Amino acid sequence: MKLSPLTQDLSIFSKLGFEHPPIGVKFSFFKPDGIEQLSLDKNLSLCEIFKEAQLTGTPFYFSAENNETCVGKVILGMADMAPVGRSGQIGVRLGVFKEARNNYNLYKYVEKMEKGVVNYVVFSPVDKLSYDPDVLVITATPHQAEIVLRAVTYSTGELYTSLTTPVIGCSWFLVYPFKTGKVNYFMPTLVHGLSGRKLYNENTVIISIPHQWLPTVTNNLQEMKIELPSHIDKEHYYAEFGQILRDLEKESQNP
């Protein structure tokens, strides 16, 4: 099936200096036309598959035919979790949870796709993106993350909201933003698997932008100041803030 074509200019994301390219993710019931499948020889977890898209710089799709070494197929609705996993035993043995009940309780928060709804997941670097993504996922430094998140609130006044769990982090940057329509961000070092696999530097921030928010964030990045003078150093901050207060005091005398 031909995926819906990209209708917006996302080139601004290629100009922000990310170490790894943002990835456009598409969930599909039908096999996507014109895109190669991830090699069947690969044995990767879902978060490693995402990183593979950043490293190869080439679009590809993942399906139930592909190997997946963690719970990726479970959160994508391609497989059921084994009862021993659902019971919460794994997290206890990892040392993440005190008892199985604590691990079990976590599952009520983790978003999953309904079984059979997603048969293919397409990944593409933003500069090779030919389709309209469901979610754009960015890995950024804290400084770069401030810029992207400011583009969320710049014209909306929306809160910054960060949600994750200590395990199954791939759900929070792939499925959660798609199902809720909410921008999400978190540090991969907070999540057991992402941290243990050492996929990113410790100061990395993952930001996920669902399709509903892409026009707003993109337009704001094109309009707003990317680098704020007050962020240069403390002296610039106090100088600018002080001048603003003096100007407002003067202007407010004759409102």
Image (spheres, helix red, strand yellow):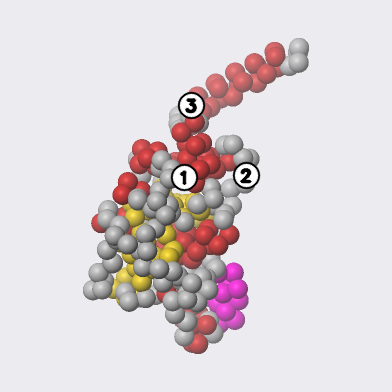
Give the residue pinned by disc 3: 229
Query: Reading the chain from its start, which is encountered first: label 3 or label 1?
Result: 1
Mark 3: few, some, or many residues within 10 Å (few <14, many ≥20)? few
Q: CA distance from mark 3 to mark 1?
A: 17 Å
Q: CA distance from mark 3 to mark 2?
A: 23 Å
Q: Secondary structure at mark 1?
A: helix
Q: Position of residue 9 (x, y in %)?
A: 41, 40
Q: Position of residue 40 (x, y in %)?
A: 26, 73
In the rendered view of the protein, which quadrant contains the C terminus?
Answer: top right
Mark 2: few, some, or many residues within 10 Å (few <14, many ≥20)? few
Instruction: Give the vertical position of 228 relative to 211 (above or below).
Output: above
Kind of residue sitting beneath label 2: Glu
Q: Is residue 100 magenta?
A: yes
Give the residue pinned by disc 2: 158
In the image: residue 118, left or right of residue 62: right
Q: Is residue 64 magenta?
A: no
In the image: residue 162, left or right of residue 226: right
Q: Nearer the viewer, residue 102 or 8?
A: 8
Query: Reading the chain from its start, which is encountered first: label 3 or label 2?
Result: 2
Mark 1 vs mark 2, foreground winner is 2
Q: Which residues are magenta?
A: 96-110
Query: Reading the chain from its start, which is encountered first: label 1 or label 2?
Result: 1
Kind of residue sitting beneath label 1: Ala
